[in-house]
Image (cartoon, rainbow, N blue to C red):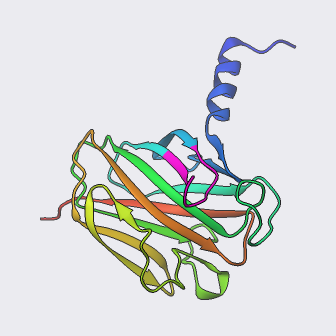
Amino acid sequence: MALSPLASANAYADEQKVWAAGAYSFSDELGGFRITRTSGIGTKDDPIVITEEMNSATPVTLTIRTTKPIQPFGTAGEFANGLMYMRMDVLNNSGQAWVEFQFELQEILDQPSVFGDGLSFDQRNKTPDNILSSSFADFDRDFEPYDRLLFKNGKIDPLKTGRFEFLITDYTPRWTFYLVQDPRIPTG
């Protein structure tokens, strides 16, 4: 039985929802944004780069899955090793300026990450030098019962791209986890 042209176009669109980089895949399957490119293996010198476009100022969730064997502290790119240097290049296509931007890690979808899951924004490092943004001057990290990283004191205007860099550590690696992205607009 032959597939109609529409069916093959839909299959192609579905395939584009999963992007590989390093030992992981990244998906926009939960909606609200679109990944346009990925690269890198996850080291400090070759971070995983996710390029994406957000069409609103509402939270969206990036699904992250391991695609290679889990081996804590194994070679980046060959194993999901619990250390993932990330760079997010986010295009603001929402029509509104973003005055803050928050990331939240979740081991279980829609549930806060807790200390025992081992997942964090490099929680053990009290003075991180690898958390940066092209658009925001400062950041705050919150731990327990959440693992959140809030960038503040800046903005990303509509049709501009903001760059965010950080390290995700996962000392009890799982096959799937989530990164919630929450652009904030001015209130009042």
Left or right for 55, reference 167:
left
Q: Which residues are magenta?
A: 39-50
Where does the image place residue 41, in percent across and percent down from the top left? 64, 52
Task: Identify the residue at the far front of this view.
Answer: 45
Where 37 sits versus 172, above or below? Answer: above
Q: Is residue 48 magenta?
A: yes
Q: Nearer the viewer, residue 96 or 82?
A: 82
Quarter-of-image position of residue 73 = bottom right
Rendered residue at 12%/65% (across/down)? 188
Rendered residue at 70%/19% (across/down)? 8
Where 166 sits versus 89, above or below? Answer: below
Q: Assign the N terminus to one quadrant of the image.
A: top right
Quarter-of-image position of residue 45 = bottom right
Where does the image place residue 46, in percent across and percent down from the top left? 57, 52
Where 124 sits versus 129, above or below? Answer: below
Task: Identify the residue at the far right of this view.
Answer: 1
Q: Nearer the viewer, residue 113 or 20?
A: 20
Quarter-of-image position of residue 138 = bottom left
Left or right for 92, reference 48:
left
Does the magenta stretch mainly form a helix, a strand or a loop? Answer: loop
Left or right for 180, reference 136:
right
